[in-house]
Image: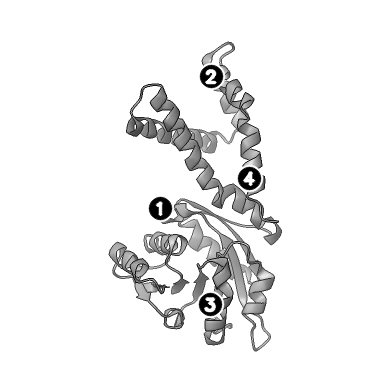
Amino acid sequence: MKISIIGAGNMGGAIARGLSQGTVFSASDISISDINEANRQAIKAFNPSINCFESNSDCIAGADIVVLAVKPWLVEMVANEISDKLDYSRQIILSIAAGVPVDQLRTLFPDKDEQGATIFRMIPNTAIDVRESFSCIASWNATEEQEALILSIFNEVGKAMLVQESQMNAFMSLSSCGIAYVFRYIRASTEGAVELGLYPNVAKEVVLQTLKGAVALMEANGTNPEVEIDKVTTPGGITIKGLNEMEQAGFTASVIKGLKASYLK
């Protein structure tokens, strides 16, 4: 099985690197195209067995899955270039372009035989580079076997979930945009620790391990966050004082407002 990725930027490159470390594809089964030579060279430097092309048409030849990893405003241009060269009876189209719905993709990739193209729309996050992404996936005209295939591929680079397309934008706010919000928390915690007298590199190491521990606890126990918070907040203790100060400063409200602000309507 072969996969072709159009676009070797941040997300396309991350997908190629992540998949090349899994078991579904060998690096030589992965092709990627980009007009930017520096992007292609970066992929080759990571793994020279990944096939790199300047031409999108050359890239998709022989692929079973074609991934559109370009900016939303470039999807139509790419579709005009490759739509007549696709074999819709066997090639799956998967788009990660935010804000480009399946209905639009269907018009951009019309099947001349009226069978209809098999289209997936996916929103991953940049942690796919280290095989720890959350990817939400919606499908159109796909069989159960095809859905299972796409899930198996992207479960190798994190966690993948089939969702209704109407929920895609909410998932994007929570995960794709949300990873930036996590990084902002890490930065804020590190800056606070420096003010308390710790060196930045030490503070960052502590914050990262604390986040890992919190995730491990919730996954192991299957608990609500408040249950784990209650285990730490001794009556009259320092943790509850810190939490109350954060809430007074609008911590929860700020997170909710940020998610809602990044929600595409």
Classify mark 4: helix, strand or loop. helix
- Judging depth in this view, the residue of 32 and 187 nearest the camera is 187
Residue 182 in percent (x, y) is at 51, 41
Between tags 1 and 2, which lies in front?
2
Tags 3 and 4 touching, CB below 8 Å? no
CA–CA distance in space, label 1 to label 2 = 33 Å
Q: Amino acid at mark 4?
A: Leu
Residue under label 3, please give it.
Answer: 78
Question: From mark 3 to mark 2, how far is it between C-alphas?
Answer: 53 Å
Disc 1 marks which amino acid? Val
What residue is pinned by disc 2?
239
Number of marks in the image?
4
Q: Quadrant of the C terminus?
A: bottom right
Q: Earlier in the sequence, mark 3 or mark 2?
A: 3
Q: Earlier in the sequence, mark 3 or mark 4?
A: 3
From where the camera sits, is residue 189 visible? yes
Mark pair 3, 4: CA separation: 30 Å
Q: At label 2, which amino acid type do we have?
A: Thr
Mark sitting on residue 259: 4
Q: Residues within 10 Å of mark 4 (few under 14, many from 20)?
A: some
